[in-house]
Image: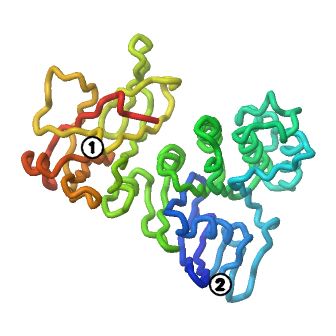
Amino acid sequence: MTRLAIDVALHRAVFALEAAFELGDRGVTTLSGKSGSGKTTLLRCIAGLERPDGGRIRWGDEAWFDASLPIDVPTHRRGVGFVMQDAHLFPHLSVRQNLEYGARRGGDRPGPTDLDRIAADLGLARLLDRGVTNLSGGERQRVAIGRALLGRPRLLLLDEPVSALDVVATADVLGALERVLESLPIPCLYVSHDLREAARLADRMLWLDAGRIAADGPVWQVLSDPRLPFAQEEDAESVVAGRVEAVDPSTGLARVGFDGGDLWIAAGEVAAGSKVRVQIRARDVSLALRRPEAISVLNILEARVLDVSEARNSPSQALVRMQVGGTLLLSRVTRRSAAELGLAPGVLVWALVKSAAITR
């Protein structure tokens, strides 16, 4: 069922935004694009913080904005949870009091009301009685996310919530978000310029280019599209979603089953039965026409070539897109290798991926 339907236009002296898309009942959609592409502006239009010049925004049968009527429902009546780059907490209140403020704003809307449960999910239980001015950046962002969730929003908007954090704090907040968003019963629109965040958190990706949506689809599909700029980057990646089938403590490896076979990855803290997403860099995927034997590489996957294109930023290299079961996989090889192997659409190959090169 469609929850949010948006079709808006906004024009400024040096910028034009024209975007139309829909969100369903739940799921995480990442809104990505280069700086200045209109990501934050679009989010502010949805929240009611920016007024479009034309178009409409609807939540189910309820009009939030319609330039032709005109209707422009104020932000506080849209029931949107908005977390920005800066946590914007109340400095004179404790962590618990900031969370309680969010809960009071939720009114009669359905949603999470258990403050202690939200605090536990976000790793805030031990911080509830502390003042927020003494928190780290990552802790402050987790409080902001908790406050937004306890406001029982109909829609959660996250505007680059980790972009101002250091590496350690970013990992901290992303881990908490991963736990919370997986079971979130509402749709979430997540703005990020970091494609690894999108790969880790999102189900769907919207790629915004100069104010217009240039791509829209499952995150694994969009990230593997050779027509888009990030697939041409040196660190281009494929996203593989699967489930941990087994963990081998003696080797520190976990076997992940996915639509296309199995992958051995570093186990880390994953548990058998858990869902995982992993990223595989295109430059870490080697290709062979026959299955190799007596080789140190653990992951050897049968694949069919979909297309071969020249890497635009490196004329000596080729980008090979392959189908592994129902999963797309990218490989970056030299054009000479592609020619010698006779790589072309339909050719069967073996893709070789080192376990040590796979990241989460």
Across and down, in percent, residue 184 comes to: 65, 46
Residue tagged 2? 53
Observer able to see residue 63: no
**Residue visible at 75% across and 82% down?**
71
Residue tagged 1? 324
Which amino acid type corresponds to the residue marked 2 in the rendered image?
Answer: Asp
296 lies left or right of 136: left
Specify which label sits upstream in the sequence, 2 or 1: 2
Examine the rendered structure and indicate whether residue 242 appears above or below residue 202. Answer: above
Examine the rendered structure and indicate whether residue 53 appears above or below residue 4. Answer: below
Examine the rendered structure and indicate whether residue 160 appears above or below residue 6. Answer: above
For label 2, the SS is loop
**Residue visible at 76% across and 49% down?**
111
Which circle, 2 or 1, is nearer the viewer? 2
218 lies left or right of 123: left
Observer able to see residue 79: yes
Within-10-Å neighbours for mark 2: few <14, some 14–19, many 20+: some
Q: Quadrant of residue 112?
A: top right
Q: Quadrant of residue 303?
A: top left
Across and down, in percent, residue 354 comes to: 30, 30
Within-10-Å neighbours for mark 1: few <14, some 14–19, many 20+: some
